[in-house]
Image (spheres, rainbow, N blue to C red):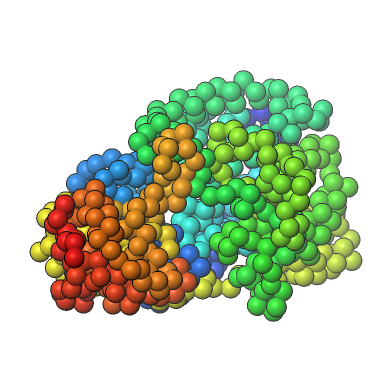
């Protein structure tokens, strides 16, 4: 089966004619595409490359800290052993279910040598850059294999898919969602399942790929599997391709059986931990109605595009990282016109493919709208299919707006097919060439991405970097930076990550930025971070709002109980505190801590308060 047209032989997985030219020309094409993809990826991330240790992605400080922590945890696993999918290093004493979070385990292990050598900060920007480059290159190879005869057409589609507005938006801190290469690689393996006599090998390969994809981007893998299933069903129903689909069905089913066994074995424990392990939860920690795509967003432009730089901005997304469609009106018109052009010139087999692409695009567009229709920021009373689907497993933990990312692949295929048709000058008259070339430029140039915004963050204190903290905390003990680590104040999580990457004695931290259960446990919906207690909220409120509470002995009694619950041996305060939108109110935190705990000790470049569990703070 082919994306572009029905196969000519039962065992053939490449129906399109081979690219004209020598092997050396093909290799040169691959090299140039790889170079262009890597160059664009470095261009987008150069703000981090300039100073990875003190620069941070401005629009998503918390997620970058989380992924740096996960990368460092990979080195901890290799040195000390442990469970890749559960840890009490963070959110002590309860721990964190990493299988229910985006733990990117494969990256954490694969890049562990780099993390040890250069730190998780460098590993983070390395993985982010390679993700973007690999996505464009993988789509280029996929399109060249199954869709386009001309390498220029495949390159156009590949660059669009790799650097589409939605994926550039997710490059703001998401090492999982920026792994856009997973989709073409998995789809490639899926399409190869129909090869006769190779169902065992192909099934094993696809099963292994699913296991890798689950460990990197489980939500994205779910979307790919769902889109692949919808496409295959829609492609198989029309009369023109029904016989071919029926003939391939036994081989495909055999391959899928092997895939299920291999993936089931490799993912048995991760899936067990994900659904029934400790500290798991139901649903997601985010409001699905809030993270739904506005219908107008498909025709708007994202923040990091030339169009937005020119003034075509909007406020349609919940945050800059979730600008998942934002194709712009010209591209939406171009895709419809291109699809109609392809349909008019297609035979029955190719029309089956075009129809299947339209079905996938339509289904996922509707899913991206969420439970209720949003129009220009206003939620209507019009219910949508997701209102029912959100009660089902997997759908209950997905964010609807992200379903729009599937349309990136759909649009990329249509653009590549159209470019391939237009480059065949014997098929399309010259005026059409000129018109569509102008339309391509008008639609795609405004989407050209701008570099990711970066800002500065608090440098690692010498108290942590030099190991001075070990004088205050026994190995395996608990210490925390003030305020306690969370998504909007993640410094404390970073200090632990950098310590894990260096090796040697380690400490635990309370709280942290992760997804976990609410107070009711597994049957409750998830929440961001730990359930707050009186003491951690006291410090977080001071840091976020500059509010200095009137501390009483009741507060001190609560703090004694909280510190004993966490097993904290010491707390410390750095000279600056990084927040989600800049530096936080450090002076308010110091005043609050001094009022609660007494005078601190100045050690290296931090203020330190020793804590005797069950004793401190003492009533006044």
Residue 158: which quarter of the image?
bottom right
Q: How many marks?
A: 0
Please provide percent x and percent y for residue 82.
24, 41
Q: Is residue 287 above or below residue 121?
A: above
Task: Tell me the quarter of the picture where residue 170 sits.
Answer: bottom right
The one nearer the camera, 308 or 448, is 308
For residue 291, side relative to residue 125 (left or right): right
Question: Which one is nearer the viewer's eye here, 167 or 411?
Answer: 167
Q: Nearer the viewer, residue 381 or 44?
A: 381
Position in image of residue 148 (x %, y %): 69, 51
Q: Is residue 254 above or below residue 483?
A: above
Residue at point 43%, 63% (across, down) = 488
Q: Is residue 289 left or right of residue 51?
A: right
Query: As displayed, is residue 308 above or below residue 114?
Result: below
Residue at the (63%, 49%) spot, across then down: 289
- Extreme residue in the top direction: 250
> Would you say 598 lies left or right of 83 here?
left
Question: Quadrant location of the N terminus?
Answer: top right
Q: Give the quadrant of the C terminus.
A: bottom left
Percent across and percent down for residue 533 are: 34, 52
Q: Please report the residue visible at 44 percent of the width from the left and 71 percent of the height from the top.
A: 545
């Amino acid at each position: 089966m082919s994306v572009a047209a029905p196969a000519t032989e039962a065992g053939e997985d490449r129906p399109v004619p081979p690219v004209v030219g020598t092997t050396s020309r093909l290799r040169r094409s691959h090299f140039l595409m790889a170079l262009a993809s890597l160059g664009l990826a470095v261009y987008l991330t150069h703000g981090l490359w300039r100073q990875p240790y003190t620069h941070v992605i401005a629009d998503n400080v918390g997620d970058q800290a989380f992924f740096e922590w996960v990368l460092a945890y990979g080195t901890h696993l290799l040195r000390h052993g442990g469970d890749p999918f559960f840890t009490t290093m963070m959110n002590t004493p309860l721990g964190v279910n990493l299988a229910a979070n985006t733990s990117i385990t494969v990256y954490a292990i694969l890049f562990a040598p780099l993390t040890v050598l250069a730190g998780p900060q460098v590993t983070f920007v390395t993985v982010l850059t390679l993700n973007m480059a690999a996505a464009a290159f993988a789509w280029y190879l996929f399109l060249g294999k199954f869709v386009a005869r001309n390498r220029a057409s495949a390159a156009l589609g590949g660059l669009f898919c790799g650097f589409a507005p939605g994926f550039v938006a997710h490059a703001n801190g998401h090492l999982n969602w920026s792994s856009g290469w997973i989709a073409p690689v998995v789809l490639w393996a899926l399409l190869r399942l129909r090869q006769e006599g190779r169902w065992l090998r192909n099934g094993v390969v696809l099963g292994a790929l699913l296991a890798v994809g689950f460990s990197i981007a489980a939500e994205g893998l779910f979307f790919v599997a769902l889109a692949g299933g919808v496409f295959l069903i829609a492609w198989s129903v029309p009369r023109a391709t029904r016989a071919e689909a029926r003939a391939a069905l036994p081989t495909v089913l055999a391959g899928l059986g092997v895939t299920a066994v291999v993936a089931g074995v490799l993912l048995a424990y991760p899936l067990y931990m994900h659904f029934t392990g400790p500290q798991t939860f139901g649903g997601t920690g985010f409001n699905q109605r809030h993270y739904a795509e506005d219908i107008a967003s498909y025709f708007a432009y994202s923040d990091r595009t030339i169009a937005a730089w020119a003034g075509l901005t909007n406020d349609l997304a919940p945050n800059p990282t979730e600008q998942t469609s934002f194709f712009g009106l010209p591209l939406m018109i171009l895709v419809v016109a291109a699809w109609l052009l392809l349909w008019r010139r297609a035979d029955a087999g190719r029309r089956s493919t075009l129809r299947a692409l339209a079905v996938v695009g339509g289904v996922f567009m509707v899913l991206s709208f969420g439970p209720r229709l949003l129009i220009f920021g206003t939620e209507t009373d019009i219910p949508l299919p997701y209102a029912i689907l959100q009660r089902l497993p997997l759908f209950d933990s997905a964010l609807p707006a992200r379903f729009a990312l599937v349309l990136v692949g759909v649009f990329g295929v249509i653009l590549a097919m159209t470019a391939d048709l237009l480059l065949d000058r014997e098929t399309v008259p010259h005026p059409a060439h000129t018109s569509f070339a102008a339309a391509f430029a008008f639609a795609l140039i405004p989407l050209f991405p701008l570099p990711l915004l970066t800002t500065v963050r608090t440098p690692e204190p010498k108290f942590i970097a030099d190991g001075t903290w070990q004088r205050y905390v026994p190995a395996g003990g608990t210490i925390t930076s003030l305020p306690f680590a969370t998504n909007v104040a993640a410094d404390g999580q970073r200090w632990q990550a950098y310590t894990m990457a260096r090796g040697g004695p380690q400490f635990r931290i309370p709280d942290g930025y992760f997804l976990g259960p609410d107070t009711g446990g597994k049957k409750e919906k998830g929440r961001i971070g730990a359930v707050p207690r009186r003491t951690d909220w006291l410090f977080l409120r001071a840091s976020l709002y500059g509010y200095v509470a009137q501390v009483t002995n009741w507060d001190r009694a609560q703090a004694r109980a909280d510190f004993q619950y966490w097993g904290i041996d010491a707390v410390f305060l750095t000279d600056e505190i990084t927040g989600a939108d800049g530096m936080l109110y450090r002076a308010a935190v110091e005043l609050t801590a001094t009022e609660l705990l007494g005078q601190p000790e100045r050690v290296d470049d931090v203020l330190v308060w020793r804590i005797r569990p069950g004793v401190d703070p003492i009533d006044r």
